[in-house]
Image: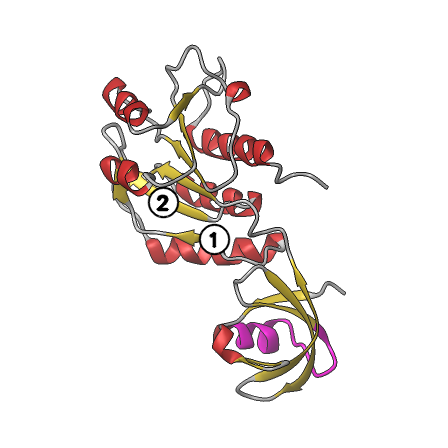
């Protein structure tokens, strides 16, 4: 049987005992029907997996005992994706897939050519939470509220690596990008792409302006591909 994963607040831990309540407890008891003696994994969103045995499952809460704690590689690659808002629920897809890839933070934004203006942050964080559980992450990817394009340039100011994927870039590809140790900002546009002025602003703000090649990719595809390529460059896919 698959060992199920639960994200718990650190305050619910006392030494080697963890209290599971709220929605995670309801999922444990009502949906999965786990009982005392079952093995589970508990994560406190700190990059560790805690392998536990359930010792109590009552009507209102469960208690698990930590048997073994292991540090994961999830904290090694600090990548933030700044993603233009997309139409028709495609932002949901980008969040889901980029959480699976290992992005630490996702910041949606509105630029000059963005068509979609509405963003439901609660829905986005629920998708992030479920995706983290599905892919076996020890961290929940943070999704912020939507910002402006100028905010993106401000928020990314302190990042060590800064990549701006621009559909009209004709010279620089991902091959020429050599990341240094530290956090990485990745910017990908919406369906309408970027204006030349926005690309120039990004370049002036210290971004490496890069191309994803000759093919015209859909915006949601571009977000996933660019993120995967950057994580590969950082070494995230080594076995």
Where's residue 85, x and y in %? 33, 38
**Dot 1 lies on which element?**
loop
Q: How far apart are marks 1 and 2 (CA)?
A: 11 Å
Residue at the disc numbered 1: 141
Q: Residue furthest front?
A: 181
Where's residue 118, x and y in %? 27, 45
The magenta-colored residue range is: 24-39
Question: Residue at coordinates 26% horizontally, 35% vertically from top-left?
Answer: 149
In the image, 50: left or right of 204? right
Query: 67 above or below 203?
Result: below
Residue 21 seen by the camera: no
**Dot 2 lies on which element?**
strand
Query: 186 above or below 50?
Result: above
Question: Residue at coordinates 49% horizontally, 15% vertically from top-left?
Answer: 215
Give the crowd class for mark 1: few <14, some 14-19, many >=20 residues within 10 Å: many
Q: Residue furthest top?
A: 170
Where's residue 72, x and y in %? 64, 56
Q: In which quarter of the image is residue 166?
A: top left
Residue 47 seen by the camera: yes
Quadrant where the N terminus sits is: bottom right
In the rendered structure, are the residues bearing label 1 and label 2 in contact, judged by CB atoms less than 8 Å apart?
no
Q: In which quarter of the image is residue 71?
A: bottom right
Q: Nearer the viewer, residue 185 or 99?
A: 185
Where's residue 195, x and y in %? 26, 21
Residue at the disc numbered 2: 107
Report how many numbered discs are placed on residues in the image.
2
Q: Is 37 inside the magenta-drawn segment?
A: yes
Give the crowd class for mark 2: few <14, some 14-19, many >=20 residues within 10 Å: many
In the image, 145: left or right of 141? left
Query: 139 above or below 167?
Result: below
Question: Residue at coordinates 62% horizontally, 51% vertically from top-left?
Answer: 73
């Amino acid at each position: 049987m698959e060992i199920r994963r639960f994200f718990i607040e650190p305050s619910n831990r006392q030494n080697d005992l963890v209290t599971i309540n709220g929605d995670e407890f309801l999922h444990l008891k009502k949906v999965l029907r786990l009982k005392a003696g079952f093995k589970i994994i508990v994560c406190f969103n700190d990059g560790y997996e805690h392998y536990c045995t359930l010792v109590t499952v009552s009507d209102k809460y469960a208690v698990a005992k930590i048997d073994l704690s292991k540090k994961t590689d999830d904290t090694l690659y600090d990548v933030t994706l700044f993603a233009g808002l997309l139409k028709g629920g495609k932002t949901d897809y980008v969040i889901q897939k980029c959480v699976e890839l290992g992005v630490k933070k996702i910041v949606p934004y509105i630029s000059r050519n963005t068509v979609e203006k509405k963003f439901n942050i609660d829905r986005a964080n629920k998708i992030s939470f479920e995706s983290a559980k599905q892919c076996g992450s020890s961290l929940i990817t943070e999704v912020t509220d939507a910002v402006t394009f100028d905010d993106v340039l401000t928020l990314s100011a302190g990042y060590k690596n800064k990549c701006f994927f621009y559909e009209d870039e004709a010279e620089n590809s991902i091959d020429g990008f050599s990341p240094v140790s530290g956090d990485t900002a990745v910017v990908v546009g919406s369906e309408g792409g970027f204006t030349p002025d926005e690309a120039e602003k990004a370049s002036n703000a210290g971004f490496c302006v890069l191309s994803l090649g000759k093919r015209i990719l859909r915006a949601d595809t571009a977000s996933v591909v660019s993120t995967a390529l950057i994580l590969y460059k950082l070494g995230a896919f080594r076995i």
